[in-house]
Amino acid sequence: MGMTITEKILAAHADRQEVRPGELLNCKVDVVLGNDITAPVAIEEFEKLNMDQVFDPNRVVIVPDHFAPNKDIKSAEQTKRIRDFSRKHGIVNYFEIGRMGIEHCLLPQEGLVLPGDLVIGADSHTCTYGALGAFSTGVGSTDMAAAMATGEAWFKVPETIKFVFYGELPPWVGGKDLILRVIGDIGVDGARYMAMEFTGPVIDTLSIDNRFTMANMAIEAGGKNGIIAPDRITLDYVQGRNKRPYKVYASDPDAVYSQIREYDVTNMEPIVALPHLPENTKKVSEVAGTSIDQVVIGSCTNGRIEDLAIAAGIIKGKKVHPEIRLIVFPGTQEIYLEALRKGYIEAMIEAGAAVSTPTCGPCLGGHMGILAKGERALATTNRNFKGRMGDPASEVYLSSPAVAAASAITGKITPPWEVA
């Protein structure tokens, strides 16, 4: 009996020939990740162990991105805590303000996560790295502390759902729409503690940026991880970035899946998730005309260069609606620079957008775009829970960069083909 790509990676990191769903494993980890919210708690627990050093200062990564640049005294103190810890333990990959980025955009860019890796992070969207063919998942801060000390973590081998996408991808439909369709189909707990394996002819042609978006939101369906088997698109992205060897895995033809779900994308429209759950999805044409107060383009879901290119292509030469606030968050400094050089940032600023240094910002209700009572935002972020971006009486709609950009121009939710 064959194994899935997820099972193979877990088996390799547990020094096992094979594993099956439901088994409990102790695995060696390749990367341990924390940020300015989760790492301080992990550091406190780590220090209770009286360890002299972390298991490997090259494989612990700490990124201050949630409240960065620091928004208040408390966030400054938290960042100082992780900065001091990183200096004390010689953490090679601590990313200071001005060099940092949103963690799940930054780590792949820097070649710190690679195909075949096993990665844990004290952040739920660590599942993003499955786009590279890695097993990556979010954990609690205490698990992060244990892994920093030992280089190991325990797992229950998840069952796998296989999602097969076929047909002709229509204009303006991308990875955000595909994953929102899946979440709308199976619900926010439809893949609870399961691996979500994305395959099919549509995935085979999907860009790496779109793949990151899909893997990023596996957690919004309850998934333990999202994963796409590496191919030439993956390896072209990794080449020149990787700082160590890696191994490519793929599912066996006779691998066992708990479910196989198929999607014909040929007649798809862009998808919008309505408040207050990512599963509350509709076609953009069904919610067109909904008034909004703010548009957010960016985040670890859609802050990459292709996302900014799509948004700028729609916005260029136009003006943001006078009653709308458009805030743009490039995923990393490198992405920001590339967008500057290609004219994307100029186009958006000339249209009336505010462009921020890379940060999670309003995505988690942090800062730089918090909503007041009764306000409504359309965002390319990943969650729209009640109070997620501000006051509990505010609303967040989720969409692709194309829909977000078009809507910023008109002041209401708008299909991109109406303004592009």
Image (tube, helix red, strand yellow):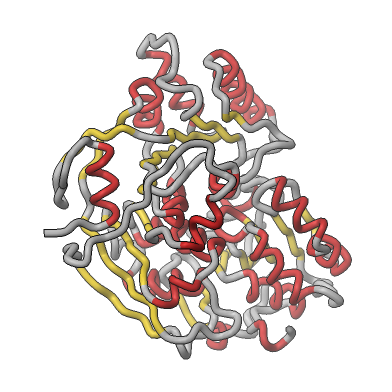
Name the residue nearer the viewer: 377 or 341: 341
Is residue 383 visible in the rendered image? The answer is no
Residue drawn at (63%, 57%) of the image:
303
Could you say where residue 134 lies in the image, as x and y percent from the top left? Answer: 39, 49
Q: Quadrant of the C terminus?
A: bottom right
The answer to which image quadrant residue 231 occupies is bottom left
Could you say where residue 380 lies in the image, as x and y percent from the top left? Answer: 59, 64
Could you say where residue 170 lies in the image, as x and y percent from the top left? Answer: 54, 85
Residue drawn at (66%, 38%) of the image:
100
The answer to which image quadrant residue 90 occupies is top right
Is residue 301 visible in the rendered image? The answer is yes
Q: Residue furthest left?
A: 1
Residue drawn at (37%, 60%) of the image:
229
Name the residue nearer the viewer: 81 or 315: 315
Q: Is residue 108 above or below residue 283?
A: above
Q: Is residue 242 above or below residue 198?
A: above
Residue drawn at (54%, 31%) of the image:
62
Q: Left or right: where does residue 195 sit relative to residue 375? A: left
Could you say where residue 410 lies in the image, as x and y percent from the top left? Answer: 75, 80
The answer to which image quadrant residue 117 occupies is top left
Q: Is residue 288 above or below residue 374?
A: below
Q: Quadrant of the N terminus?
A: bottom left
Q: Left or right: where does residue 366 sit relative to residue 7? A: right
Q: Is residue 405 above or below residue 10?
A: below
Q: Left or right: where does residue 391 sit relative to residue 368? A: left
Count every numbered label the image shows and give the total.
0
